[in-house]
Amino acid sequence: MSPKQITVFGATGAQGSSVIRSLSSNTSALFTLRGITRNPDSASAKQLAASGIELVKADGWDKQALIAAFTSSWGAFVNTNSDDAVFENPEETRTELDLGKIIVDAAVEAGVEVFVYSGMASAREVTNGKLALAAFDDKHAIGEYAKATGAFKAVVIPSAGWYFENFLVPDVAPIFGGFPFAPSEDGTLVLRAPRWGGNEDVGFIAIGDDYGDIVHGIFLEPEKYAGDLVQGVSDIRSLAGVVAAFEKVTGKKSRYEEIPDWHDLEVYGIRALETIKLMFGFVQEAGGKYWGVETEKGTAAGLKRKGAEAGGKSGKEVELLTLEGWFEREFGGK
């Protein structure tokens, strides 16, 4: 049987590169891979090309270029960037939904059969209109638009939770009290954030370690998950549980401090952080249901195992990464 072509839109991003890395490890050579990038001369694009990945240049707003990029593809993985610089322009009238529709339409015209989109639940729908969140609502609408075309054999929505990797960004740490980089005056590393809501079950995802394998698992059996929103979850913890896991493996004194009112999270007018602030409002209003339903990782665990085993992994490598394991690796010796 000939390998199936999968094309990744957003190939050099955190999600896209994780998907490519996992799919390229498939030991049965089930897939050939193509990556779409706006800038093939970037360092990350050159690194992908050097690893043997076919790269094509296309902008998400250029439908004809996208049709050419998707041509001959059985499957597509697509992640649109809510924080793209184009949306920072106050005079810009186009939305992420507009972008997503162009990409979907191009995939349809190119004859793509399996469309895997990194979408979200709709904050507006989950909260019955009480709170809107453009990044979530637009991504949800893109997924629904893809389903409504009726052109794909399967549309699957792997939806990423809170990135483990966010804890690696020193510039973000001060927004949340300094954790895990800058101690407070009493020497404690403080994670300061609004409560999550409900049972305080925050779904965290190791994008680099787990997300690609989860998507790999979807591509192995796309019809099984057709129409589903798959929770991208590696570990489920409260925010207090996060700092407890960190303290356990690093020995560094840490604590969680709740910001009583999510409106008081200071984001300094930064658009991407404003989305995070609204996210806290959304999950509180939703009773902690980030995906509109109870948070669970059983589905992700099964897909992780399938994808990882297809890539030749075994033992602990086919299991979802825990916060303790990740913190130990990233901060244990520091």
Image (cartoon, rainbow, N blue to C red):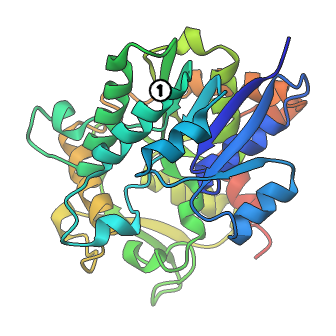
- Helix, strand or loop at label 1? It is helix
Tell me the quadrant of the picture where the C terminus can be found.
bottom right
Task: Report if residue 27 is visible in the image.
Answer: yes
Q: Nearer the viewer, residue 182 or 171?
A: 171
**Relative height, residue 22 to residue 35 (above, below):** above
Q: Residue at x 75, y 37 (%)?
A: 33
How many neighbours does mark 1 have within 10 angstroms: few (below 14), some (14-19), or many (20 or more)?
Answer: some
Q: Residue at x 83, y 24 (%)?
A: 310
Tell me the quadrant of the picture where the N terminus can be found.
top right
User: Where does the image place residue 296, in percent across and percent down from the top left?
Assistant: 48, 27
| Farthest-out residue, bottom | 185
Q: Residue at x 80, y 56 (%)?
A: 49
User: Where does the image place residue 173, in percent across and percent down from the top left?
Assistant: 47, 75
Is residue 247 rendered to the left or right of residue 141? right
Quickly name the residue at label 1.
109
**Relative height, residue 329 to residue 101 (above, below):** below
Q: Quadrant of residue 198?
A: top left
User: Where does the image place residue 151, in percent across and percent down from the top left?
Assistant: 43, 15
Residue type of the residue flagged with mark 1: Glu
Q: Could you tell me how many numbered marks the image carries?
A: 1
